[in-house]
Structures are given as structure tokens and as C-alpha cells.
Image: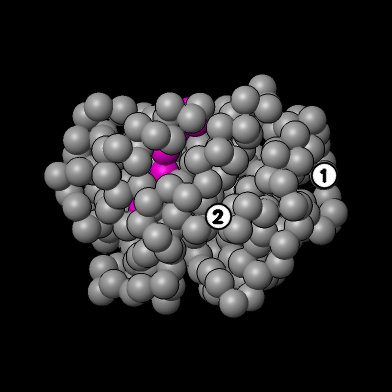
């Protein structure tokens, strides 16, 4: 299992939202690159970057920050937020990202998703975020009637190799991941699944590593790292059972 330190960018700063609420934001680093360099220096193998402005706008809004992060660290990064057409995906990859994370468009534009999977294969991650078991869209500001487990099963059959799944109810709370829901999602696909939301203690990572299905390949952690609950190195050790 891989630890993915999170860098959410809004208004040029590294921030965290509570339960996906744009009105409940905490700013941590004035320059997102500072967070990236910190996490990479502590041993991060991969970074997860979200353009929150882009998620709301429907197109990337923090490309310069993405470029600087990709150039400023040795580990690869994956980037999401507003990637709803091929030009946006190309812009993120050209900026230095190893993977792109597609959310809203994966559900609303099947032809676009199929084209991206065909063109970029495993460099495409599909974000399926759940509120009350249903998929949330447009930077978590809109709800759909599609069940998250159903969505993952359907998209997996169309060739998606990796999913990122967030339980919005626990995101930013640091009260523990939604393990039962993650297990249902993982059982619905043979693809790899990255878990996101709720990690606040090393024990949460230990539980994920011990009890999650084998295709849960990683965990995204944000607020707990920013608030010094543990270090990246300690988190990696917890995941590895050391």
C-alpha cells in the first residue's frame, strides 16, 4: 500500500476542506510547493494534487502550481480538478503529472473517458466520490442518483485500471476511513483502488493495511499530515507494519 500525501490548491494556497465544504476551509501553506517539498523530503513515493478552483470551474486553474510541484520534487504526482476534456488532460500531463484524475466527466461523458483510457491507459485515475452512498460531482457541489459501488463496477468493465474513492462524510474529520464502504467498492472491481478520507491516526493506516481488500493500493492523507499528527515516514512505516 502506498501513502499519497494530499495537496489541495485553492486561491494559490494549500488548503483542506472539511467534508468537501468550500465554506469550511483551512489554509496551511501559502505556496503549495512548500508542502510538496516537505512531503517528498520525508519520503513520499507519490503525491496527490487537487486543483479545487478547477474542480468548481470545470477546467484547470492552477497549472503553474502543478508545473512547479512536478519540477520541484523527485516523486511522481497525480493531479485532478476540472479535467473534463482532452485539452485539460493534456495540459496537466504536459505540466509534468504522471497521472490525471478524472471525476465528473467520467460519469457524464463516457466517450471522453473511453478516449482518455485508450490514449493514456493506466495514467488515468477515475475519482468516484461518495456522499450517502451516491456519487458526488462537480467538486462535490452536485449530487447524482448513481450508487458509488454501481459506478465503480460499470467503469471498471470499461477498462478503468485505477479508482480514487472518497467518503465525503469522513473527509477531513480525521475520525477514521469508511472501511465498510471501501470494502464494498473494492469487491465490485478488479481495478486498483486508492482510499481517501478520514485518516487521522497511525492506527487508521494500520487497520487499512491489515483489513482492506488487496486491491486497495493506497491511502490519501491530508489534514493529519498538515496538523502534525504524524510524519510521512511514520505513516509509511505504519502501512508497512513496522
Q: Nearer the viewer, residue 140 or 3?
A: 140
Mark seen at residue 196: 2
User: Would you say residue 98 sits in the magenta stretch?
Assistant: yes
* Mark 2 touches mark 1? (CB < 8 Å): no
Mark seen at residue 166: none
The reply to whether residue 80 is in sight is yes
What is the x, y in percent for residue 198? 63, 63
| In the depicted structure, whether residue 201 falls above or below residue 170 | above
What is the x, y in percent for residue 2? 61, 36
Q: Residue at x 56, y 32 (%)?
A: 67
Give the quadrant of the N terminus: top right
Mark seen at residue 231: 1
| In the depicted structure, whether residue 201 falls above or below residue 63 | below
Q: Residue at x 35, y 32 (%)?
A: 90
What is the x, y in percent for residue 222? 68, 54
In which quadrant of the rendered view does residue 137 lie? Answer: bottom left
Q: Nearer the viewer, residue 1 or 137?
A: 137
The reply to whether residue 1 is in sight is no
Distance CA(mark 2)–CA(mark 1): 17 Å
Q: Residue at x 37, y 51 (%)?
A: 59
Q: Seen in the image, is 213 located left or right of residue 4?
A: left
Give the quadrant of the C terminus: top right
Q: Which residues are magenta?
A: 97-103
What is the x, y in percent for residue 27? 72, 62
| In the depicted structure, whether residue 235 falls above or below residue 178 | above
What kind of element bears circle 2? strand
Amino acid at each position: 500500500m502506498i501513502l499519497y500525501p494530499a495537496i489541495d490548491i485553492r486561491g494559490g494556497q494549500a488548503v483542506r476542506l472539511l467534508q468537501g465544504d468550500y465554506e469550511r476551509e483551512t489554509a496551511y501553506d501559502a505556496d503549495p510547493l512548500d508542502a510538496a517539498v516537505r512531503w517528498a523530503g520525508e519520503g513520499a513515493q507519490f503525491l496527490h494534487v487537487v486543483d479545487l478552483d478547477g474542480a468548481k470551474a470545470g477546467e484547470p486553474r492552477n497549472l503553474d502550481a502543478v508545473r512547479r510541484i512536478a519540477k520541484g520534487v523527485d516523486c511522481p504526482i497525480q493531479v485532478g480538478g476540472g479535467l473534463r476534456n482532452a485539452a485539460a488532460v493534456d495540459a496537466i500531463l504536459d505540466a509534468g503529472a504522471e497521472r490525471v484524475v478524472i471525476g465528473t466527466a467520467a460519469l457524464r461523458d463516457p466517450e471522453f473517458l473511453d478516449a482518455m483510457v485508450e490514449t493514456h491507459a493506466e495514467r488515468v485515475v477515475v475519482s468516484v466520490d461518495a456522499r450517502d452512498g451516491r456519487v458526488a460531482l462537480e467538486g462535490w457541489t452536485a449530487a447524482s442518483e448513481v450508487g458509488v459501488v454501481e459506478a465503480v463496477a460499470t467503469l471498471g468493465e470499461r477498462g478503468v485500471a485505477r479508482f480514487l474513492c472518497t467518503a465525503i462524510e469522513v473527509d477531513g474529520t480525521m475520525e477514521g476511513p469508511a472501511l465498510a464502504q471501501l470494502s464494498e467498492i473494492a469487491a465490485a472491481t478488479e481495478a486498483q483502488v486508492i482510499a481517501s478520507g478520514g485518516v487521522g491516526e497511525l492506527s487508521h493506516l494500520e487497520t487499512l493495511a491489515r483489513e482492506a481488500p488487496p486491491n486497495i493500493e493506497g491511502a490519501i492523507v491530508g489534514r493529519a499530515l498538515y496538523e502534525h499528527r504524524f510524519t510521512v515516514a511514520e505513516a509509511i512505516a505504519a502501512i508497512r507494519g513496522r
